[in-house]
Image (spheres, helix red, strand yellow):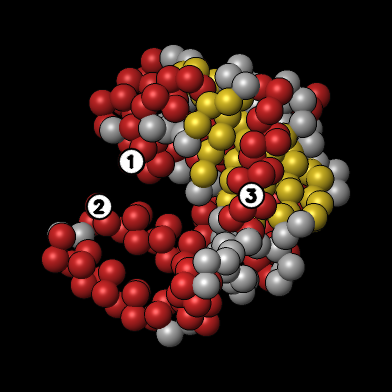
Amino acid sequence: METILYTKADGVATLTLNRPEVMNAINFTLIDEMRAAIAECAQDPDVGALLLTANGRGFCAGADLAAKTPTKEGLSRGGNVAYGMEIGFNPLVQELHDLPKPVVSAVNGTTAGGGVGLALCADIVIAGKSASFIQVFGPKLALVPDMGCTWLVPRLIGLARAKALAMTGEKLTATTAAEWGMIWKCVEDDVLQEEALGLAKQLANGPANAFAEISTALEISNDHTLAQQLDYERTVQGKLGDHDNFAEGVTAFLQKRPANFKR
């Protein structure tokens, strides 16, 4: 692969963005290679979690504006921007979000533009203290935030803060991002990879079927009344209760031993 590294160990697949010379800016080669790795991860029975990380001084600078992008005859400039999103950027975000295994992202240095959405697609985000998040779409490019930022950011930090960040392009430090609830935690830079990998290993040994249902249940809760969500919880618990992982969890709890869940 030209733009990423993909390795597996101890039940964790690590996908590393590897275009450090351009701060891991996203071109279509990177999109294609990430999508292939995500698909492989989804089907691999030996992998229980995915760790998303990056080489170099920054996590991701967003779309590579200098790169050649696919175009479609007859479309305007804006039409071709939308076409590139339709065939590349949007499927990448959706497939990463929908991966039926826990995803941890380790954010180092600056992440900007679409890189913010890429990082926040993970179930759990850990950032080094020197990391920052910048949405440059509006003030720099006269565009709306994309790669899921308009969906992810307001759900995490609220509409008022999301609007201000999108319109001002103000840099959000990792410390503040953690205080606002946009990410799980902020750690010292020199332990970022160790912390993120340790968490990914912990999740890889957990009940993947339950983790997938947890993610879905929390995300849809905003669209439900309490009564609807209680009904949904009942339905999902019934399904999970029939799975071998529930029986193993109960047995392990009563025997005071770690559970041996199936992936």
Q: Looking at numbered disc 1 in the image, what kind of residue is underneath it?
A: Arg
Q: Looking at numbered disc 2 in the image, what kind of residue is underneath it?
A: Asn
Q: Earlier in the sequence, mark 3 or mark 1?
A: 1
Residue 117 in sight in this render: no
Please name which of the two marks, 3 or 1, marks the residue nearer to the observer.
3
What is the x, y in percent for residue 97? 52, 54
Residue tagged 3: 200
**Residue 32 against residue 230 in the figure, above or below:** above
Instruction: Report which quarter residue 215 is drawn in.
Output: bottom left
**Residue 253 against residue 198 in the figure, above or below:** below
Residue occupying image coordinates x 74% and y 39%: 17
* Total marks in image: 3
What is the x, y in percent for residue 5? 81, 45
Residues tagged 3 and 1 counted as in contact (Cβ below 8 A): no
Residue 3 in sight in this render: yes
Residue tagged 2: 222
Residue occupying image coordinates x 15% and y 60%: 226
Residue occupying image coordinates x 58% and y 64%: 258
180 and 159: which is toward the camera: 180
The dot on residue 117 is none
**Which residue sits furthest bottom?**
242
Q: Looking at numbered disc 3 in the image, what kind of residue is underneath it?
A: Ala
Residues tagged 1 and 2 counted as in contact (Cβ below 8 A): yes
Residue tagged 1: 155
Residue occupying image coordinates x 63% and y 59%: 204
Q: CA distance from mark 2 to mark 3?
A: 27 Å
